[in-house]
Image (spheres, coloured by chain):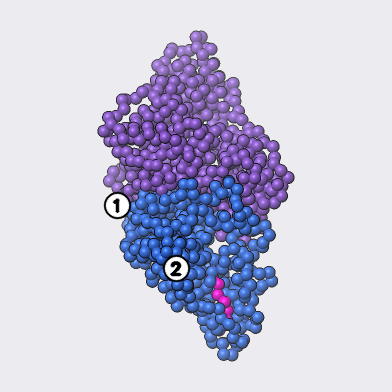
Chain colours: A purple, B blue
Amino acid sequence: MNGAESLIRTVAAAGVDVCFANPGTTEMHLVQALDDAGGVRPVLGLFEGVCAAAADGYARMAGRPAMTLLHLGPGMANGIANLHNANRGRTPVLSVVGDHSAAHRGRGAPLESDIEGLARPCSKWVRTSASAGSLARDGAEAVAAAGSAPGGVATLIVPADCAWSEADGPCPPIAPDPEPAVSDDAVEAAARLLRAPADRPVTLLLGWGALTEAGLRAAGRIARAAGARLQAETFPARVERGGSIAVAPRLPYFPEEATAALAQGSSVLLVGAREPIAFFGYPDLPSELVPPGMPVQTLAAPGEDATDALERLAGALDAGAGANASAPRKASPLAGAAGPPPPAPGAPLTPITVSQVIAAGQPEGAIVVDEGLTVSAFYVELSTGAPRHTYLALTGGAIGFGLPAAAGAAVACPDRPVIALQADGSGMYTAQALWTQAREGLDVTNLVCANGTYRILLEELSRAGVDDPAPGARALTSLGDPGLDWVALATSMGVPGRRATTAGELATAVSEALAEPGPHLVEMVI
Amino acid sequence: MNGAESLIRTVAAAGVDVCFANPGTTEMHLVQALDDAGGVRPVLGLFEGVCAAAADGYARMAGRPAMTLLHLGPGMANGIANLHNANRGRTPVLSVVGDHSAAHRGRGAPLESDIEGLARPCSKWVRTSASAGSLARDGAEAVAAAGSAPGGVATLIVPADCAWSEADGPCPPIAPDPEPAVSDDAVEAAARLLRAPADRPVTLLLGWGALTEAGLRAAGRIARAAGARLQAETFPARVERGGSIAVAPRLPYFPEEATAALAQGSSVLLVGAREPIAFFGYPDLPSELVPPGMPVQTLAAPGEDATDALERLAGALDAGAGANASAPRKASPLAGAAGPPPPAPGAPLTPITVSQVIAAGQPEGAIVVDEGLTVSAFYVELSTGAPRHTYLALTGGAIGFGLPAAAGAAVACPDRPVIALQADGSGMYTAQALWTQAREGLDVTNLVCANGTYRILLEELSRAGVDDPAPGARALTSLGDPGLDWVALATSMGVPGRRATTAGELATAVSEALAEPGPHLVEMVI
């Protein structure tokens, strides 16, 4: 058995069962090993950014890493943006990158580059295999590194000679380090905070480890027992939502609004979330979103077991409620609201009507992959009353995540409908994902918010006092002239597409797309 | 004037007149400065890889750098593959990347990353501006660094506060270091080599600095005077071809063929080319392409003035021909051949017939951007008799270069027709370039070789003894199931498209596309 086969057998034994790949010559032995070893399903992406985001979406849903297989430094570089998102979201990904053989490196071949240097900024673990004999062990360690808390991207660079040379055989799986439980002290300190008298409620700021079904149910108990308010980080990797699960409204994107939301509380208790800071810095605003002077305490840091921490805290508060609770405070609303009635069929499509139609149409068990950007906040707010669903956000801010992450989520969960809420500008980054959706027959309903602009940039210009951009700025923020035809684009890659311009057309299109297996795309003209 | 405007005024004064951009929030002040300062035309790419390759194509034709403007680490990462190509081709590019403000950095904002770390592998020069006051000077130095011999990518990272804070004003241009002339000793040594008795001719291996019109005319004189043979590096940044210019056949891609070609000579004289090595390493082949024991001598290293060196060498040989020349050797054929007659109109499209039709149809003065991959060798061989044209190859092996580089070349040379000879697999990497072609009304004829596979990988598998790939390998090398509809894809981005399945259909399509202004696409079904 050569090194390539020893690696594939190793990662398959460790639970890796899919490989999102765009290989080249240096990876041909690894490609053959996928066939020879079996157990790892190869899925082709027509661009590496597709592979990386698909692995991200897959792992968020499957709870275990997928493998990506990319070609040398430039191929990996094409995946960096979406690997960055995965790494920021603490999503485990096994990123395997081929390299030139040892004998060929250092001679200036056209494709030679510093792969480790490129990988480090988007990886928690990077290694270049030294020999065919060490490749299996490297693979086992890489899978363990990706999955160990906090999760992230493990990059294993495989020189071609390590793949093609003879090896001993596979390596047994190495167990990843689980999320550590928080200390009893942290739970008790949190309970004290929640029981202490205050004029306003404590804000529980929940990161994605706390946004599980169990975590949110425990958070709901805490909110009821202690009159606390819940808030979710703005861009969580995964949230369980809808049905009877407690609602944690997302922290607003713009800093003034986020600070105003937090100012409704007396202090902030971090549960699986970092101390919140603004997405971008602005000339006259602080980066910190917590109002100046407001106390911040940590129950669970990112990578600690936040759900367990919430359950233990809820238990402590339930048990002590009769004896120690201060005067009951007004709890924030925790149940999802059905929202306003759906818009009239003839209503034009706006961020609000689009969100209403999707929320009303999404079926039980849907997975919503959200890269709707300027539409997202409306959708998140208006979908609290939707049936039970799982929501995945853009964790690292690198656009081009949505369409391929939806593909990855659908590979992980073939029995659940996937809805990609997708902005048009970011959708153009990795539109090749539509082809992978078609080839694999994935049940993805792609809903493209076609407003024909980089709307967020117009909002940023407006924040900077520019409401009427000059011609250059206008050209660089517009997707018009010519407008993009998303129906033709989808068709070109084998995905049936249609266009909706009213709420009624959209409701029909969404309903029919969801009813028919395989991918569909609806261009929502906003 | 803020730092942003001081930078744009500086680079405009240094000759930068176009900016291929995909900016974000951190670059909004630079975007406004493009309007306020004037002189630098903003061109939007819908993906950063488009911007980077467009800048590459632009600079190869214009002979001066364009600016790219990309958004933070992930945005720049999307451009790395094509910046790698530019840097490998010694093409000057001014890569400006926005960063968070100094006050916002180091706090773990979602889009924060190690931009310098990402930039270094694809840049010859990297700097992060320290203040608004230093930004103009940094810009002047960056333009000079990009253009100084050997050219390459200069990455200037601009923290948002450097852009928005008050600055003194622009900085005068700094002259780039020109290509140094080679020494008289190098010319004399080359002349001695060419005059020395040998059983076979000397091979002049010409890199792109030698592949200018003047360089090739001088090389032709040398070949005639000394019976030398000419060979061009496999993937030159730019070659002047056709008409009466001497032909330098390209060194074959596969190592066995390249070594066999060089074995026709007695020694190798490098003129603006590196010592040739294989594109990839193989288990049983050396990386070096020069046959073992064959002497290699350098007339001009890459980055030295190869054209001047050839002219001086030609002069030395002409002057001394009567007195010192050894017995005349048989010169290699230097004139372009008209090639075989064009294929019958009903002939099916193959790499050969496609090449014949294009070579027969390309007009005087065309710029041919070649990312045809497995079709390229046929085209290069069969187009030696075409009218005068300029040819640009994929220098760094990172695919996704062709369509956007064609856009950049067309921006540089609006009066010349541009032909993009484009493989389908690599075309899908940066197909968004078609939209930029449409928006800017660029006169590009995109000819897509639609063979529905990553053909080069099938050839590599075959070289490894696998003629009938297993299902996984087949899936990862096929672009079928579903097939790509390039006509619909072009239409979706505002580029008129049509399909050709025979030589006659292709000839008509090419002729009509060339006759009508603006971009067109022809899907050549091979």
Magenta stretch contains residue B231: yes
* Residue type indicated by callout 1: Pro
Q: What residue is rendered at 65% in x and 33% in y?
A: A175
Q: Is residue A41 above or below residue B219?
A: above
Checking the image for residue A70, the label placed there is none
Q: What residue is rendered at 51% in x and 15% in y?
A: A317
Q: Is residue A9 left or right of residue A428?
A: right
Q: Nearer the viewer, residue B21 or B385?
A: B385
Checking the image for residue A471, the label placed there is 1
Which mark's residue is nearer the viewer, 2 or 1?
Answer: 2
What is the x, y in percent for residue A208?
50, 30
Q: What residue is rendered at 62% in x and 70% in y?
A: B260
Q: Residues within 10 Å of mark 2 (few under 14, many from 20)?
A: some
Residue under label 2: B343
Q: Residue furthest front?
A: B346
- Give the distance between the C-alpha atoms of the residues marked 2 and 1, in whole angstroms: 49 Å
Task: Specify start and end residues of the magenta stretch as a single range.
Answer: B227-233
What is the x, y in percent for residue A55?
53, 40
What is the x, y in percent for residue B435?
37, 53
* Residue type indicated by callout 2: Pro
Q: Residues within 10 Å of mark 1 (few under 14, many from 20)?
A: few
Q: In the rendered image, is residue B271 in sight?
A: no
Q: Nearer the viewer, residue B505 or A480?
A: B505
Instruction: Give the chain letter at badge 2.
Output: B
Q: Nearer the viewer, residue A286 or A12?
A: A12
Instruction: Give the chain letter at badge 1.
Output: A
Asked whether the beta carbons under mark 2 and mark 1 sit within 8 Å of each other, the answer is no
Q: Is residue B408 above or below residue A116?
A: below
Tell me the SS state at disc 1: helix
What is the x, y in percent for residue A82?
50, 43
